[in-house]
Image: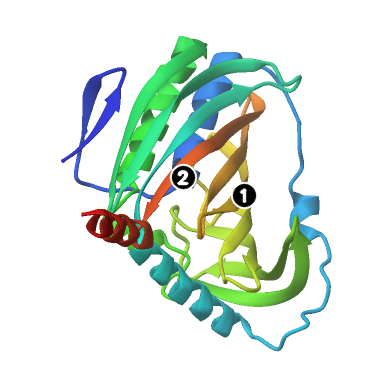
């Protein structure tokens, strides 16, 4: 069993793991739509996904790029010991008004334990109870387990088609179209931006590989990453859910103030302590 802490209390979670932030976001979108009951159309991601890119300067095919990504991810994951971050969840309407918000510290410890301690909340109690709580529980369950492997961006789950290159901020990236190998609700289809030097995901934009619910007409998401102490960790998630009768709702997750512990740091601390004796 895995335990999540909210406001000092433990929430016991079943062993069945679920990595998919897509499913969790979609669920949150349905609950947010029901709670706020307003029409909106804040953003169309189709233009972003279809935007042209520059021809690749390096000869590399989709299979090679995906293999390099998987290899470098494995190396980075093996060096990651732990991290903490300030996590903020928000549901907003078309005018940008916050309908619900919850913040707290998310802690990760290898090989797959996550805990969340809530520090503040505001807005609709219904959205926080029916959307944020299941979403946080799903993310904690996602830290390890069989579904982690089944939903990871690896050659076992996806094929890549090289589209070209593009700069995302200071990062020069390969751009690839990711196609799932099966119509699984835990997989997605869309664009992936991969840093050309470190073979790390910088950005993902797409939609679930399978329709999630009769009530959901469309789900689009964008996840952005940033490099922190050698690791590429989430910076911001935005999910846009088009729900029957209620229109589009937006869920945003901000990731801030990371404190990362890595294998090299641990060895260096031990050596420094030994040198001081």
Report the residue marked by disc 1: 224
Q: Could you tell me how far apart the alpha carbons at marks 1 and 2 are, in whole angstroms?
A: 13 Å
* Residue 156 vertical position relative to residue 190 in the rendered view, above or below: below
Q: Nearer the viewer, residue 64 or 230?
A: 230
Which class describes the residues within 10 Å of circle 2: few (<14), some (14-19), or many (20+)?
some
Q: SS class of the residue under badge 2?
A: helix
Task: State the residue at coordinates (57%, 68%).
Answer: 179
User: In which quadrant of the rendered view does residue 119 lie?
Assistant: top left
Seen as rendered, the residue at the extreme left is 1
Quadrant location, the C terminus: bottom left
Label 1 element class? strand
Is there any visible trace of residue 34 in the rendered image? yes
User: Above or below — where is 106 with respect to 118?
Assistant: below
Which residue position is annotated with label 2?
Answer: 21
- Quarter residue 251 falls in: top right
Instruction: Give the x, y percent position of residue 61.
Output: 64, 85
- Neighbourhood count class around disc 1 (C-alpha, 10 Å): few under 14, some 14–19, many 20 upward: some
| Residue depicted at 57% across the width and 71% down the height | 199
In the rendered view of the protein, which quadrant contains the N terminus? top left
Q: Is residue 97 left or right of residue 227?
A: right
Q: Nearer the viewer, residue 122 or 235?
A: 235
Tell whether 272 sits left or right of 207.
left
Which mark lies nearer to you, 1 or 2?
1
- Judging depth in this view, the residue of 217 and 78 nearest the camera is 78
Residue at 39 percent of width and 70 percent of height: 74
Residue 150 visible in the shown view: no
Q: Position of residue 230 (x, y in %)?
A: 51, 60
């Amino acid at each position: 069993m895995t335990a999540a802490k909210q406001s000092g209390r433990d929430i016991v979670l079943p062993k069945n793991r679920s990595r998919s932030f897509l499913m969790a976001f979609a669920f949150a979108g349905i609950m947010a739509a029901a709670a706020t009951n307003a029409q909106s159309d804040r953003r169309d991601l189709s233009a972003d996904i279809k935007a042209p890119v520059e021809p690749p300067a390096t000869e590399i095919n989709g299979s090679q790029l995906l293999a390099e990504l998987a290899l470098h991810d494995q190396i980075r994951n093996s060096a990651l010991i732990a991290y903490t971050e300030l996590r903020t969840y928000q549901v907003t309407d078309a005018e940008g008004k916050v309908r619900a918000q919850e913040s707290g510290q998310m802690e990760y410890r290898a090989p797959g334990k996550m805990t969340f301690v809530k520090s503040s909340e505001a807005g609709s109690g219904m959205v926080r109870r029916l959307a944020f709580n299941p979403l946080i529980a799903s993310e904690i369950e996602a830290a390890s387990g069989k579904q982690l492997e089944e939903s990871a961006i690896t050659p076992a789950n996806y094929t890549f088609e090289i589209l070209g290159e593009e700069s995302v901020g200071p990062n020069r990236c390969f751009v690839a179209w990711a196609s799932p190998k099966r119509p699984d609700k835990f997989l997605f289809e869309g664009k992936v931006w991969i840093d050309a030097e470190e073979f790390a995901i910088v950005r993902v934009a797409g939609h679930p590989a399978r329709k999630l619910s009769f009530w959901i007409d469309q789900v689009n998401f964008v996840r952005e990453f940033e490099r922190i102490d050698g690791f590429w960790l989430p910076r911001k998630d935005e999910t846009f859910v088009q729900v029957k009768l209620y229109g589009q709702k937006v869920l945003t997750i901000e990731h801030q103030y990371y404190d990362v512990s890595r294998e090299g740091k641990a060895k260096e601390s031990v050596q420094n302590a030994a040198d001081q004796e």
